[in-house]
Image (cartoon, rainbow, N blue to C red):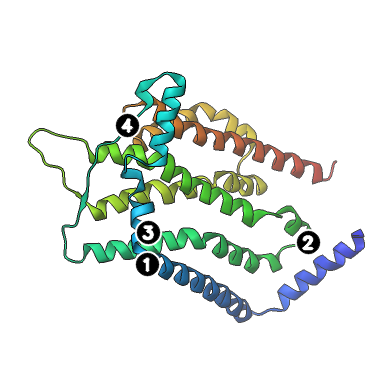
């Protein structure tokens, strides 16, 4: 496309956006929110209707000895001739301690899973709302933005579900104290699973956050490299907290991907700063 045509497109987009009043923007936003809400509600109802499958195959998966993570660890232990890596959790059951706990937990699970499934569409609607206010070159630079954010979020959720949750849940649920009978409530189990999955989906958006912070000049790759050692310590502490298993291998399974995200963020920041310096006029 010729450069003059790009300029015309940019002027047209700015003019089209400027011609809209405040209430026009609110009306557009309202329909984006309505469509997002409809998709979210529909997926939540589908999850709610498939109670047996959702709980037996998904929710209770990380606490079962035949969970795929434990199978992979045992196969890896056999291949490496390291029997200590093969971890088989003890069997335990959840209990409900309130009359309405089972129903409200069912609702909570449906809402959380419904949100996770609808996140790509909700983010797409958000992108459609802000896209008309961007220049053509800005839209081109953000190509694949929705797909990347959705991929990182779902990757973080799956990482928390398949890697972090099985070891953390099994360790804490079977932790014994003298003269104590453990009774793990269903609500506390769901809260713990949610804490180990949903926040990790947000944490995995770190490269995207660094991209925008670098874009506006708040973060630089030099700053990130300078605090690399501090970050390693923080990551190890976080890994030790969310994976309270005494096995150092399981803690490294958490720490290594998190550190990898930090290194990716440094590369992203470096490319953004380099491109910004190339576009700045030379004196």
Q: Quadrant of residue 111?
A: bottom left
Residue at 58% x, 50% y is 151
Of the pair 227 and 115, the residue shown nearer to us: 115
The disc placed on residue 53 is: 3
In this rendering, is residue 114 above or below 59?
Answer: below
Q: Which of marks 3 and 1 precedes in the sequence? A: 1
Q: Residue 48: give its label.
A: 1
Observer-side mark, 1 or 3, equals 3
Residues packed near mark 3 inside 10 Å, few (<14), some (14 to 19) or many (20 plus): few
Horizontal placement of 24 versus 104: left or right? right
State which quarter of the image contains the N terminus: bottom right
Task: Find numbered disc 4 in the image and state the secondary structure of the residue it sits on.
Answer: loop
| Image location of residue 40, percent across then percent down | 48, 68
Question: How far across and how far down the image is residue 200, in percent?
Answer: 45, 46
Q: Position of residue 157 (x, y in %)?
A: 46, 48
Describe residue 103's horizontal placement relative to residue 225 as left or right. left
Of tags 4 and 2, the one toward the viewer is 4
Secondary structure at numbered mark 3: helix
- Residue 187 in view in this figure: yes
Residue receiving disc 2:
136
Identify the residue at horizontal 43%, vertical 42% (top origin): 162
**Local SS, label 2:** helix
């Amino acid at each position: 496309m010729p450069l003059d045509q790009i300029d015309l497109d940019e002027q047209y987009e700015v003019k089209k956006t400027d011609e809209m009043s405040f209430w026009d923007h609110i009306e557009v936003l309202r329909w984006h929110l309505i469509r997002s809400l409809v998709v979210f509600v529909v997926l939540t109802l589908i999850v709610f209707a498939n109670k047996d499958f959702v709980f037996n195959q998904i929710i209770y998966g990380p606490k079962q000895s035949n969970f795929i993570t434990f199978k992979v660890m045992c196969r890896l232990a056999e291949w490496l001739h390291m029997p200590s890596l093969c971890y088989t959790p003890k069997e335990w059951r959840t209990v409900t301690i309130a009359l309405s706990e089972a129903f409200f937990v069912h609702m909570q699970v449906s809402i959380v899973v419904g949100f996770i499934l609808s996140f790509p569409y909700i983010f797409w609607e958000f992108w459609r709302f802000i896209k008309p206010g961007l220049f053509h070159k800005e839209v081109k630079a953000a190509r694949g933005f929705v797909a990347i954010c959705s991929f990182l979020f779902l990757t973080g959720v799956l990482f928390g579900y398949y890697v972090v949750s099985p070891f953390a849940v099994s360790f804490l649920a079977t932790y014994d104290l003298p003269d104590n009978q453990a009774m793990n409530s269903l609500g506390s189990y769901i809260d713990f699973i949610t804490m180990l999955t949903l926040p990790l989906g947000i944490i995995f958006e770190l490269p995207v956050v660094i991209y925008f912070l670098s874009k506006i000049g708040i973060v630089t790759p030099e700053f990130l490299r300078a605090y690399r050692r501090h970050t390693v310590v923080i990551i190890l502490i976080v890994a030790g907290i969310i994976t309270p298993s005494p096995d150092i291998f399981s803690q490294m399974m958490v720490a290594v991907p998190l550190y990898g995200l930090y290194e990716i963020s440094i590369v992203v920041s470096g490319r953004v700063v380099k491109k910004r310096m190339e576009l700045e006029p030379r004196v």
